[in-house]
Amino acid sequence: MKRIMFLLLFLNIAFSASSNNEPKYKRGDCITPTDNTYSWFGKYARVEGVGLIDGFSGKTYALLFMNYQSNSTIFSKSIERSTKNVERELCNIDKYMSHTNKTESTATLQKGDLLKFVIASYIHGFNEFDTSINASENFVSISIYFAPSAQQKNRAEQLAKRFKVQIPLMLKQYSWGSDVEIAVQVYGEDRIKRGY
């Protein structure tokens, strides 16, 4: 009887531990902090991805902030403790494309600027390399710069492959983003020595 009780207790603990490893949020969820000490308290972020990223321990979240300028877009699973899921409509990027204030003036983004905004918020989290983005109505060019004297070319090429797959998938969720062509280039350049 003691063995059965011990086995049941062990299985319960093992199940609880494995269920705690499952991410609380999934891609497309809209979240907001519940802790008022967070710099983005009262703001919203859409979960763009959940997974393992080199340089981070455990699963991480890639977030796209709707109405907040963040210094990072990659967060550890620990944000689950101080955030909650909210209505997905609060993270509808079309809602933030134009803004009307009390005087009825409107600010509008061109498609190329919106593409830069959405893509930059994604690639900003991969801060291992310098990057640049150029965008027009239907074309986006992303450049990844690695320093041959200090960084590995194959790491930059891995990131380029990831961008070529993930960014088109991310853009397909928007009606205005499905016809965009993406080009990603990798350049070996010691930009640090040149004062960049």
Image (cartoon, rainbow, N blue to C red):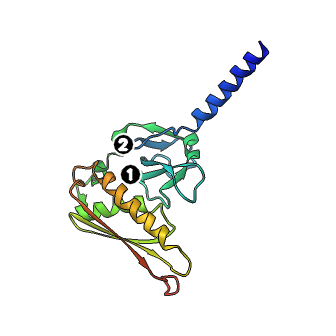
On the picture, is 193 further left or further right than 137?
Answer: right
Quadrant of residue 6 within the rendered picture = top right
Quadrant of residue 87 within the rendered picture = top left
Of the pair 173 and 149, the residue shown nearer to us: 149
Residue tagged by mark 1? 66
Can you give x and y, in whole percent of width and height, for residue 117 in the image? Answer: 34, 61
Label 2 crowd (10 A; few <14 / some 14-19 / many >=20):
some
- Position above or below: 27 against 160: above
Label 1 crowd (10 A; few <14 / some 14-19 / many >=20):
many
Quadrant of residue 133 within the rendered picture = bottom left
Task: Please give the name of the residue rendered at 44% of the width and 75% of the height, measured from the top-left corner.
Answer: 145
Which tag, 2 or 1, sits closer to the chain's start?
A: 1
- Position above or below: 123 against 4: below
Please state which amino acid type lies under the numbered disc 1.
Met
- Quarter of the image with the N terminus is top right
Can you give x and y, in whole percent of width and height, for residue 16 in the image? Answer: 62, 30
Residue tagged by mark 2? 90
Can you give x and y, in whole percent of width and height, for residue 110 in the image? Answer: 23, 63
**How far apart are labels 2 and 1 at the CA level?**
8 Å
Most extreme residue toward the bottom is 194
For the residues bearing labels 2 and 1, Cβ distance under 8 angstroms: yes
Task: Please give the name of the residue rendered at 46% of the width and 46% of the height, measured from the top-left corner.
Answer: 42
- Position above or below: 96 against 115: above
On the picture, is 82 further left or further right than 141?
Answer: right
Of the pair 118 and 158, the residue shown nearer to us: 158
Provide the secondary structure element on which disc 2 rests: helix
Provide the secondary structure element on which disc 1 rests: loop
Q: Residue 96 carries which label?
A: none
Please state which amino acid type lies under the numbered disc 2.
Leu
Of the pair 8 and 176, the residue shown nearer to us: 8
Can you give x and y, in whole percent of width and height, for residue 105 in the image? Answer: 23, 57
